Image (tube, rainbow, N blue to C red):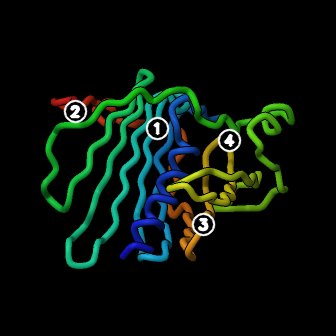
Amino acid sequence: MKKFIISIAILLTGAAAVYAQGTTFGIKSGHLKYETQTSGGIQYNEVWFDDYGKLRKQHDQIQLEGMGNYHTEVLFRDGKSYTQAWIDDEKKNEAKETDAGSGGLNLVDPDGAYLKERKIDRLGTEEVFGKTCTIYSFKTKSLLRTISNKIWVWQGITLKMETKGALGANNLMVVTAFEENVSIPASTFDLPAIVK
């Protein structure tokens, strides 16, 4: 179970680095679904964005053995993030608010100085889900451990991510569905009724 929890923490740290507030995309709107293989099982992720990423919502679901499905949902808007977490049907319309900061990666068309400053290596290109992606690698810290991240990016949008960490906590996230420049209902980005 410890290995499983570490895997989830590593994956969420990598995803947060990729989708932090301040990240911009090269297309106006989109809806993506991902499947993530973790050392503890399969996680499902869904992302909606509009206004080139200024409005963004991410939902993650993973089945915890003997506990049911654990969900997290993060809404990014107006420089803030609103996080909700629940098991199965226990969702409440309340969230914890935090300052989202501006530490997100902007990988629409980064120059060499931008990448060097952030210690990101450009590795080449590869096709993922019918899109020619640029592959980047970088390291992040999680639970006092160094995590190696490799991401495949198209128009600033991550279509594939691989993380390798300590204790065999390796994850592979791949897009399984992608609708681009679609109409996203404004209600998708509504604030929860209760914000703490």
> On the rendered structure, is 56 left or right of 178?
left
Dot in front, 3 or 2: 3
Please report whichever mark, 4 or 1, sits nearer to the chain's N-terminal start: 1
Please report whichever mark, 3 or 4, sits nearer to the chain's N-terminal start: 4
What percent of the width, then of the height, locates residue 81? 38, 32
What percent of the width, then of the height, locates residue 116? 82, 38
Dot in front, 4 or 2: 2
Q: Amino acid at mark 4?
A: Gln
Q: Residues within 10 Å of mark 3 (few under 14, many from 20)?
A: many
Mark 4 and mark 1: span between their CA atoms?
13 Å
Residue linked to disc 1: 49
- Quadrant (top left, top right, bottom left, bottom right) of the N terminus: bottom left
* Label of residue 192 in the image: 2
| Helix, strand or loop for disc 4 | loop
Q: Is residue 64 above or below residue 126?
A: below
- Whether pointer 4 and pointer 2 mark residues with C-beta atoms closer than 8 Å, the reply is no
Residue at (24%, 37%) from the top-left corner?
95
Q: Quadrant of residue 174?
A: bottom right
Mark 3 and mark 4: span between their CA atoms?
27 Å
> On the rendered structure, is 41 left or right of 10?
left
Residue linked to disc 4: 155
Q: Return the residue found at the far front.
A: 144
- Would you say residue 114 is visible in this rendering? yes
Q: Amino acid at mark 1?
A: Phe
